[in-house]
Amino acid sequence: MVAVLERLGVACDFPAAQTCCGQPAYNAGCPDEARAVARQFLRAFRDAGHIVAPSGSCVSFAKLHLPPLFEAGSPEHQDAVAIAERLHEFSQFLVHVVGTEDVGAAFPHRVTYHDSCHLLRELGVKDEPRRLLARVRGLELVEMTSSDTCCGFGGVFSIKQPEISAAMAADKVDRIRRSGAECVVAGDAGCLMNIRGLMRRRGVNVRAMHLAEVLARS
Amino acid sequence: MSPEPVNLHRRFVTATREALANPELSRLLNEATVRLNERRAASVAAVPDWQALRERAHQIKKDALANLDALLARFEHEATAHGARVHHAPAAADACRIISDIARASGATSAVKGKSMVSEEVHLNAALAEAGVRAIESDLGEFIVQIAGETPSHIIAPALHKSRGDVSRLFAEKLGIPLTDDLETLTRAAREHLRAEFAAAGLGLSGVNLAVAETGTIVLLENEGNIRLSTSMPRVHVALMGIEKVIPRTADLPVFLTLLPRNATGQPMATYVSMLTGPRRPGELDGPDELHIVVLDNGRSALRADPVAREALMCIRCGACLNACPVYRTIGGHAYGTVYAGPIGSVISPYLQPAASAPDLPFASSLCGACAEVCPVKIDLPGLLVHLRGLAMRGDLAGERVAARGLQRIAMWMWAFAMRTPARYRLASRLLRLGLRPFVRDGWIRRLPGPAGGWTGARDFPAPAKKTFRQSWTAGLKR
């Protein structure tokens, strides 16, 4: 992600104080722990300008669910709202803030794109990754059926309900195979870890890459 | 001697495993949900102000819930003024007792039923059987499920889990017709069988889709005409409804008459819409002599008392969240173990059927949000599931406790402790990478210990990277 941004002339900084946004605790039903971790997130990014993350689920959590964890009107809530406004998911940032769809990438392979749930449904990001991939030299984009069906990761869901999760992942992998793609691309590392892990276990010879990894190729 | 209490968690795990190991069920679930989703999408696309309608319906329901007691009182007053008898049932057993008493008083030996999920919720058919009244399901899907000795697996399509072959064999066995898988023949066989039942039944039973407070009217939507027959042919009609069905005005109806059929089956409108205000009046040709409306609580007040979970009472039982849910599509309705399955089922069952709700239910979701996208009344189902997870982890959700809840809370506290400062984060990261190293083979981990083994049951886990991003950055990532 840094490589792509710098190629486009965007200067990047990495605040070392950052740890995690707190989403795993929130989704697990532990809002107190989520709040405690979210405070560190607020501290780390309080003075940042544009904040970019290569993760739909982190960005959707920090924008939509983190602010309501704090009492309306409190300084933490104000910080959270202010940070949420400056926070962008990677493909959104490229297309809407940097204002470009051609990042000078080349990746001559047949690629299919998986719509990660929070990226799609909470942030409304559907076209941006596809527009970016369409401008990658040599890349052929093929759509799988039901690209917007959950891959079964769901964070803690993948270990609390491992069999249901694996069945959902198997369905996703089946669709990836049938698309004829050599590589599946997504905007969330959790989805990719899940899909890649199942493909490896089943000997499915398709690569799984993050959008940023593809866009970094030249 | 009372039977051993069922461990609901174990039952859920077993039922899920059985469902996952059933390729025929998978095929049926996929076909049915894909078909229903496609029809819904096409039907919704034809309504340009769909989003505005959803918002309107949400507001009507929200206001109704805020004024529920007054609305129910108004509804009762109006319905009674039009000759209906309104009964109140605090719990399932009360509803069964009230309806059994009505049945006994009517002298009916058989009751013909329109599809009613709330009647499943209170186990009405069993109660009526004990009172000497044979309850006959007249909705085709419910009829199939009834003669098969099963329960519905979907809010709208009760026999979704049955293939055409299943129904052919079932009808040949139970209705005595020759084995055939011609749909028209099968449907005709059911129709002829049910015709006699409609004519003979002394009692008609139905649910209620919407109850209009302004006029005391109950509104019923259907496609087969069996509700129309069940509520007009028998001498006595009993309508069972949850307290949340009431809406203020007749003018509120059109938005729901638009949303419900399109969302449920992709139809622009239900084939039959019945608006019943009291029993048959002198001079009218059709209708029952008596109309009884049983208003059921059965945990709905508890749901209403939770300011966050209350939203779930807006549900108009369209079933679209089930069709959209990848978990439902994977395990089917029966695996949930409750009358209401899918996303809405996971939210309301702990309140309406705590004795049947596995503690897994709020956690059996990846929070993908597909349900919230299709909900006609904009219930924030993923938000409600997270809310219920919070209640479950605090031990505040009714029913069986989450397995190893204490340990899970300690684990989460430890995780948060590690995540709160960058120094601890870096230390935790280093410890984790060191801890995983013995499990790595060829850059991958095939078996993780303890609860994490759930992942590696079916998937490989990546070996930790040689360098973290943080380390690369500090070492001078800039090229």
Image: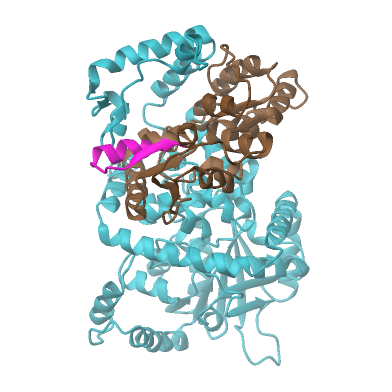
Chain colours: A brown, B cyan
Left or right of residue B469, residue A18 in this image = right
Image coords of residue B230 (percent x, y): 52, 80
Is B261 situated above or below B90? Answer: below
Where, by quadrant of the figure, is residue A26 drawn?
top right
Q: Can residue B110 be seen in this view?
A: yes
The region drawn magenta spans: A194-210
Left or right of residue B227, residue B28 in this image = left
**Rendered-image quadrant of the N terminus of chain B:** top left
Q: Can residue B458 be seen in this view?
A: no
| Foreground residue among A79 and B66 | A79
Where, by quadrant of the figure, is residue B253 drawn?
bottom right
For residue B39: magenta? no
Residue visible at 66% across and 77% down in the picture: B276
Image coords of residue B118 (percent x, y): 51, 61
Image coords of residue A77 (percent x, y): 72, 24
Is B459 situated above or below B135? Answer: above
| Foreground residue among A135 and B146 | A135
Is A53 situated above or below B18? Answer: above
Image coords of residue B125 (percent x, y): 42, 67
Left or right of residue B422, residue A50 in this image = right
Number of marks in the image? 0
Left or right of residue A61, residue B249 in this image = right
| Foreground residue among B266 and B233 | B266
| Foreground residue among B463 and B84 | B463
Residue visible at 40% across and 86% down in the picture: B191
